[in-house]
Image: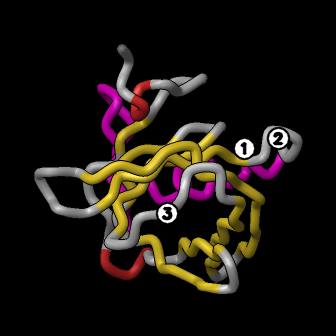
Amino acid sequence: MVASSEKRVSERYPIVEVAENSAAFHLSINDVSYEISDIQDVSVTGVRILMATPLSEGSLLTLSYLADDLEMSIEAKIIWSELDDESGLFLTGIRFNPIQTDLSTLFFLAFRKQLDRFDNGTHILQS
């Protein structure tokens, strides 16, 4: 059986370290907003994050990215959420709305804009 975290449809790019002042990503679900500060990996079809709060599979949400020169939001869906025994937090797989392909690409590029290194499948965000 394939782990739910490995059921992706495109190549994943792990983000090793998030700079302290790059917390420009937010998730809004059921009128509650969460700052996303721990991003495990990202692709043009979705993102895997680590959160203190479990989110229900199938829930619809909005992901937002805010920066000096860019502000955008994309509709998304929780594909899976499971407890990470190592951290005690919840790993959550989020799929971008497949109809919003241009936004999916732009959202991915928002991460790429901040990348310090893009080699050997490892990405490090810089401020």
The range drawn in magenta is 102-127
Q: Any mark on residue 38, and which?
A: none
Left or right: 113 in relation to 66 = left
- The relative height of residue 40 versus residue 24 in the rendered view (above or below) is above
- Type of amino acid under label 3: Leu
Callout 1: SS: helix
Callout 2: SS: helix
Mark 2 or mark 1, whichever is nearer to me: 2
Q: Any mark on residue 101, and which?
A: 2
Question: Which residue is disc 1 drawn over?
Answer: 105
Callout 3: SS: loop
- The relative height of residue 12 versus residue 22 in the rendered view (above or below) is above
Question: Which residue is disc 3 drawn over?
Answer: 55
Q: Mark 2 or 3 closer to N-term? A: 3
Rounded to the nearest angstrom, the CA distance separating label 2 from label 1 is 6 Å
Quadrant of the snapshot with the C terminus:
bottom left
- Type of amino acid under label 1: Thr
Mark 2 or mark 3, whichever is nearer to me: 3
Q: Mark 1 or 3 closer to N-term? A: 3
Q: Is residue 125 magenta?
A: yes
| Crowd class of label 3 (few under 14; some 14 to 19; many from 20; radius 10 Å) | some
Picture residue at 59% right of the left edge, 72% below the top: 27
